[in-house]
Image (spheres, rainbow, N blue to C red):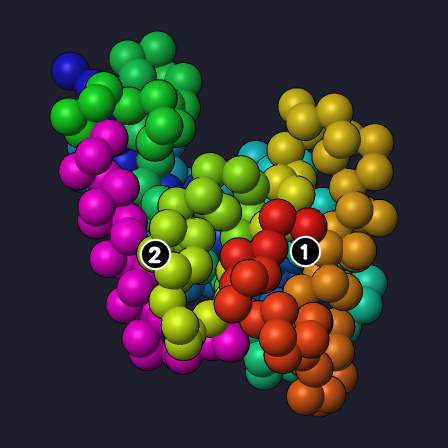
Amino acid sequence: KQWYQRRVRAQTGVPLGNLKHVKDYLNMGNFDIKPPSDVHPKVPVTGWNTMRDDPEGSKFWKFFESRYSAKEFVRKCYVATYCPMLYIDNSGKEVPPPCLPHHLRNQVISVCDMHIIDIVDILKPSIIVAIGGFTFQQVGKLFCSREVGPMVFPLLHPAPANPISAKKWTSTVNDQLVYAGVPQMLAGADYIPFGKDDKKKKRCSQD
């Protein structure tokens, strides 16, 4: 049996939801998080009582906390998860979507694609910043070929295992966000990160 549980991201319901920053920066209270009925014994869901410190989430939210108030950030930004499910093998190790069995992977990706399309249809963003190569690839497939709709930009994943992320994540991400126009957008500027004639060519920028 392959176990799976809903990624309560992983405990708080917030993507990259390091508990300290969810509480102190986003000022979110102790919501009643009920664990799934079928939980892997090695990966319990304890919600706001979790003792786990997510280094990826800490790096991500600390970056924005050092630059913007929570009010400034949530006024124009929405953070979502491409795949809001956590797949776990029998040993308790996470199995990322690309590593799932082929028949299951296609089903999962199809559902995740619809999840992102629904979010975009509701929020109508002008920019999508996709965290990590896999997410950028998948989200790019959904929107890069469109004449209208959001432009998709990559963002280096804060995973400690990534050598670039470990050494210069902050500077790299800062440059990527500036290129995408995120700081300008948060400042209230009507900013286009490249010339009008380049819009179609760079709708899904690799920079």
Residue 72 on image: x %, y %:
68, 80
Dot placed on the residue nearer the N-terminal end, 1 or 2: 1
**Mark carried by residue 61:** 1
The amino acid beneath tag 2 is Leu
Q: Residue at x 53, y 57 (%)?
A: 204
Left or right: 81 as drawn, with respect to 128: left
| Foreground of the two, 183 or 79 | 183
Above or below, 91 relative to 54: above
* Badge 1: residue crowd in 10 Å (few <14, some 14–19, many ≥20): some
Query: In which image quadrant can residue 6 be found?
Result: top left
Left or right: 166 as drawn, with respect to 48: right
Which secondary structure lies at badge 2?
A: helix
Whole-Å distance between the Cαs marked 1 and 2? 27 Å
Q: Which residues are magenta?
A: 105-127
**Mark carried by residue 142:** 2
Q: Residue at x 37, y 50 (%)?
A: 141
What secondary structure prevails in the magenta region?
helix
